[in-house]
Image: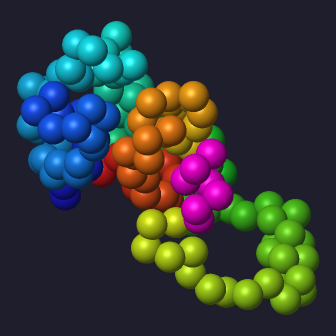
Amino acid sequence: MASVILIQHKRRRPFMIEWVYVRPRELTWFKYPKDTPWSSLKMAPIDVTFGLSKACKKDSRSPKVNLAIGVYSNDDGSPFVFPVVHEVEKYIAGKGLDKEYAGILGLESFRRASLEFALGSESKAMIGGLCATAQTVAGTSALR
């Protein structure tokens, strides 16, 4: 599965951002340009929690219990859903909210707030309208 990275190009207009698709194993060569707000960032180490969970799934020994990720399971290994979650689902369903998709790029208000959080509302990129965003689902789905 490919990942999406935003890269700032020096050869084009300042703060121009484009989508670049790369395979996860190719991410090791990626370095942020020196003159960006993100230049001090370093590649994060592999997430310990998800690494432990993956190792537990690969382990063929039995019986075992995966204590790595905070997910509750029944005796048969299926997820346990707390009763309050079902109550909230009924409450939300009773609100009569529309079931429209947010659109291919996500909610505009959320995307704009995300850009302001990441770059600052006074950044040249924000003021010049040179930024692009796309909203994805939570957790690792956005990082695949």
Percent position (x, y) of residue 76? 56, 65
Which x, y percent locates residue 73? 62, 56
Quadrant containing the N terminus is: bottom left
Reply above or below: 134 against 34. below
In this orientation, does residue 64 appear? Answer: no
- Which range is magenta? 107-113
- Identify the image quadrant of residue 12: top left
Q: Residue at x 39, y 19 (%)?
A: 37
* Nearer to me, 58 or 34: 34
Q: Residue at x 73, y 64 (%)?
A: 81
Q: Nearer the viewer, residue 128 or 74?
A: 128
Q: Is residue 137 left or right of residue 51?
A: right
53 lies above or below 80: above
Q: Residue at x 58, y 50 (%)?
A: 112
| Vertical comparison of 8 with 31: above or below | below
Question: Which residue is found at the position 45% from the left and 30% from the top?
Answer: 124
Asked if the stretch drawn in magenta spans residue 33, the answer is: no
Residue 86: which quarter of the image? bottom right
Q: Check the image and report above or below for 26 versus 63.
A: above
The one nearer the camera, 98 or 63, is 98
Q: Quadrant of residue 43?
A: top left
| Residue 48 visible in the picture | yes
